[in-house]
């Protein structure tokens, strides 16, 4: 869908089709090097089933499977940097992964150092600095922390605690 930035009104364009059975979409990001939309889905929210990466046709809503992987099984969100590299946070391992956009394979980067829970794991890049910003929900309290994630080590550094639950973020930066 689209959001009117003046009024905030959401307009549905089409439904997404082609997602694996019993999967929920948990991440969406646009590759700034190709303008390709990538989406990520997980089977339910747990278990041993693989997660999946797709490309998305915004006109038809058709998702095309890129690949599945069983390493990061409960990805909360994906973000793509200015060079087209995909990153994902995983709720099961509380870690950052890189996702191969040609195969969907996940590679561990490192632990976030933050015990996250489902329902608030938004990430986005500031393309002017290629800094990965994230909002992560605390497992033990109903609040979210805003900060940066080191894409070399996976470490999360808190900037602010929101005192409430925040579900998603977006960074407005030129590409």
Image (cartoon, rainbow, N blue to C red):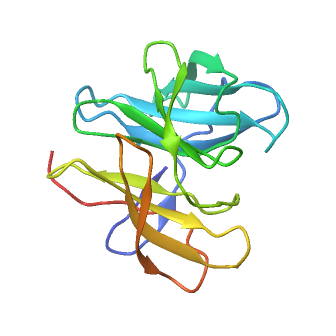
Q: Position of residue 56 (x, y in %)?
A: 49, 28
User: Which residue corresponds to the image point at 69% horizontal and 79% vertical from the top-left?
Assistant: 142
Count of numbered tags: 0
Q: Position of residue 151 (x, y in %)?
A: 36, 43
Among all residues in the image, which is located at the extreme bottom? 163
User: Which residue corresponds to the image point at 37% horizontal and 53% vertical from the top-left?
Assistant: 124
Q: Nearer the viewer, residue 36 or 77?
A: 77
User: Which residue corresponds to the image point at 56% horizontal and 74% vertical from the top-left?
Assistant: 144
Is the C terminus in the top left, top right, bottom left or bottom right quadrant? Answer: top left
Left-right relation of 73 to 34 = right
Q: Nearer the viewer, residue 127 or 110?
A: 110
Q: Nearer the viewer, residue 61 or 147?
A: 147
Q: Position of residue 169 (x, y in %)?
A: 43, 63
- Among the 4 quarters of the image, the one containing residue 24: top right
Residue 1 higher or lower than 51, as above or below: below
Q: Position of residue 52 (x, y in %)?
A: 63, 26
User: Which residue corresponds to the image point at 56% horizontal and 86% vertical from the top-left?
Assistant: 163
Residue 59 higher or lower than 76, as above or below: above
Residue 105 higher or lower than 144, as above or below: above
Residue 132 higher or lower than 31, as above or below: below
- Among the 4 quarters of the image, the one containing residue 47: top right
- Among the 4 quarters of the image, the one containing residue 58: top left
Left-right relation of 65 to 98 = right
């Amino acid at each position: 869908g689209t959001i009117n930035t003046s009024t905030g009104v959401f307009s549905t364009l089409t439904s997404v089709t082609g997602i694996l059975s019993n999967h929920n979409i948990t991440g969406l990001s646009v590759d700034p090097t190709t303008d390709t939309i990538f989406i990520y889905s997980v089977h339910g929210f747990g278990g041993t089933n693989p997660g999946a990466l797709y490309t998305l046709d915004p006109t038809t809503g058709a998702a095309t499977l890129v690949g599945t992987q069983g390493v990061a099984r409960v990805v909360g969100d994906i973000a793509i940097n200015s060079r087209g590299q995909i990153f994902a946070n995983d709720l099961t391992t509380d870690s950052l992964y890189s996702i191969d956009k040609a195969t969907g394979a996940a590679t561990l980067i490192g632990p976030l150092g933050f015990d996250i829970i489902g329902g608030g794991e938004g990430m986005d890049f500031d393309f002017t600095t290629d800094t990965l910003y994230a909002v992560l929900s605390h497992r033990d309290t109903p609040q979210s922390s805003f900060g940066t994630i080191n894409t070399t080590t996976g470490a999360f550094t808190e900037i602010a605690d929101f005192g409430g639950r925040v579900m998603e973020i977006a960074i407005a930066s030129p590409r």
